[in-house]
Image (spheres, helix red, strand yellow):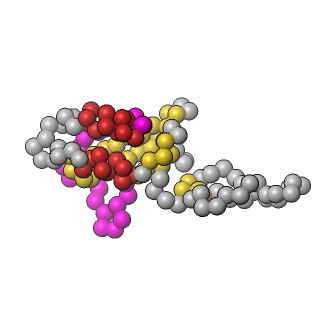
Amino acid sequence: MIRYRTRDLSRLLPGTARSMRRIGKFLARTDDMMIVRGANLYPTQIEALILEDARLAPHFLIELAREGRLDSMSVRVERREGVEPGSAGPDLAHRIKSLLGVGAKIETVAPGSLERSAGKARRVIDHRLG
């Protein structure tokens, strides 16, 4: 089997009596794509849905976890000043489920509560790897 530009990080296992070397378990990816319950997602897709809602600020954090044998995704997003806590969460969860095909737990947090970075923003924390 030839794998070319899959963007998966793995390693070659030590050689055996077989004619070809085997590939180890896939550990991570080199791009931003996330695979959640078989659906391929990019953080920019979720960002686009957040930007469509005037009640939400463009600052968010996606956390991936494994609950039992299933993957779960939660999104923490800042609400804008003057917006009631929890008012935009159900709408965003519905749009993510209907447009991207993956359920997500949405937590709207106070403005300024998510970490800011001077360089490239870290938008995804994957707890499944450890």
98 or 67, which is in the foreground?
Answer: 98
**Would residue 102 be counted in the magenta stretch?**
yes
Query: Where in the figure is residue 11, as x and y percent of width and height?
Result: 68, 59
Q: Is residue 38 left or right of residue 83?
A: right
Query: Where in the figure is residue 22, as x and y percent of width and height?
Result: 76, 54
- Report the residue at 86% width, 57% height from top: 19
Q: Looking at this rendering, what residue extends furthest in the left direction?
A: 82
Q: Is residue 11 above or below residue 45?
A: below
26 or 19, which is in the foreground?
Answer: 19
Q: Is residue 35 left or right of residue 114?
A: right
- Report the residue at 14% width, 37% height from top: 84
Q: How many marks?
A: 0
Query: Where in the figure is residue 118, as x and y percent of width and height?
Result: 30, 67
Per the picture, the main secondary structure of the magenta-coloured stretch is loop
- Report the residue at 74% width, 54% height from top: 1
Q: Looking at this rendering, what residue extends furthest in the bottom direction?
A: 119
Q: Is residue 59 left or right of residue 98?
A: left
Q: Quadrant of residue 12?
A: bottom right
Query: Where in the figure is residue 40, as x and y percent of width and height?
Result: 48, 46
One can see residue 17 in this view: yes
64 or 48, which is in the foreground?
Answer: 48
- Report the residue at 54% width, 56% height from top: 29
One can see residue 79 in this view: no
The magenta span reads: 101-123
Q: Quadrant of residue 119?
A: bottom left
Q: Is residue 98 above or below residue 32?
A: above
